[in-house]
Image: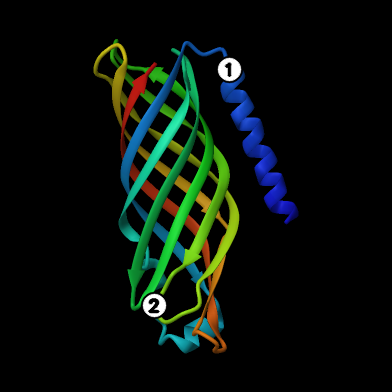
């Protein structure tokens, strides 16, 4: 609980930074991408599930998100929420990210910029397998992102980006009313995404 409270406080600081940043415009974005996770299985889960590939549960699965932030010529602050789910060998996981991020810009032309920055926030990992008791856990998320942003009009832009996150969220698997089958821990996730943004 102490870790969760610390993460919530960090997100509040990020939100305050967005509202107080010396930025020219507020922007909102819709994002679509693909996420692949690295999952560490407990020894118990290894033995009880015939050594299945947990990394395949969320592997290049569609990810949808929204962002809100402020932007100027030097960079941008923003908050992102995104959601992805996947299943493999009868096991289904859902991952939800809530991130505060900052990107710095490097112009390469009048309408094209490279960007790079860092993110900090929370991950919610849910185990939603059929025939199993549902389980949810929260963990930290910390990582980096980079990409290219193309201005389309004065108020609209599109971008192609890549984000890598480290996390420690974990979830258990057990049949309804039965013993625990084992534990899965999310160690990292990689996401390639497209975003369309509008400045207000």
- Asked whether, in this view, residue 30 is left or right of residue 101, the answer is left
Residue at left offset 56%, top offset 12%: 22
What residue is at 66 percent from the left and 45 percent from the top?
A: 7
- Residue 130's label in the rendered image is 2
Q: CA distance from mark 1 to mark 2?
A: 46 Å
* Direction from residue 172 to residue 58 in the image, left or right: left
Q: Residue lying at the far front in this picture: please name it.
A: 177
Identify the image quadrant of the N terminus: bottom right
Q: At which x and y percent is residue 105?
A: 43, 21
- Which element carries disc 2, helix, strand or loop? loop
Compare marks 1 and 2 and give the one earlier in the sequence. 1
* Residue shown at the point (42%, 42%) measured from the top left: 163
Toward which corner of the image does residue 170 lie, by quadrant?
A: bottom right
Q: Residues within 10 Å of mark 1 (few under 14, many from 20)?
A: some
Q: How many marks?
A: 2
Residue placed most toward the observer, 148 or 200: 200
Q: Dot 1 lies on which element?
A: loop
Q: Is residue 51 above or below residue 73?
A: below
Dot 1 corresponds to which residue? 21
User: Looking at the image, which residue sits at the far right?
Assistant: 2
Q: Which residue is found at the position 41% from the left and 71% from the top?
A: 54
Residue 72 at x, y percent in the picture: 46, 14
Residue 109, percent from left and from top: 29, 13
């Amino acid at each position: 609980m102490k870790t969760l409270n610390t993460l919530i406080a960090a997100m509040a600081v990020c939100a305050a930074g967005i509202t107080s940043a010396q930025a020219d415009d507020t922007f909102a974005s819709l994002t679509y991408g693909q996420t692949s996770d690295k999952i560490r299985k407990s020894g118990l889960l290894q033995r009880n599930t015939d050594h299945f590939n947990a990394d395949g549960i969320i592997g290049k699965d569609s990810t949808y998100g929204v962002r809100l932030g402020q932007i100027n010529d030097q960079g941008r602050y923003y908050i992102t929420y995104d959601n992805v789910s996947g299943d493999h060998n009868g096991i289904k996981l859902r991952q939800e990210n809530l991130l505060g991020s900052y990107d710095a810009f490097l112009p390469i032309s009048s309408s094209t910029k490279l960007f790079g920055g860092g993110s900090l926030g929370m991950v919610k990992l849910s185990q939603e397998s059929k025939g199993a008791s549902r389980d949810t856990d929260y963990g930290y998320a910390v990582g980096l992102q980079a990409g290219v942003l193309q201005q389309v009009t004065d108020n609209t832009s599109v971008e192609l980006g890549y984000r890598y996150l480290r996390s420690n969220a974990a979830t258990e698997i057990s049949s309804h009313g039965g013993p625990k089958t084992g534990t899965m821990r999310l160690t990292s996730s990689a996401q390639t995404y497209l975003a369309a943004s509008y400045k207000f």
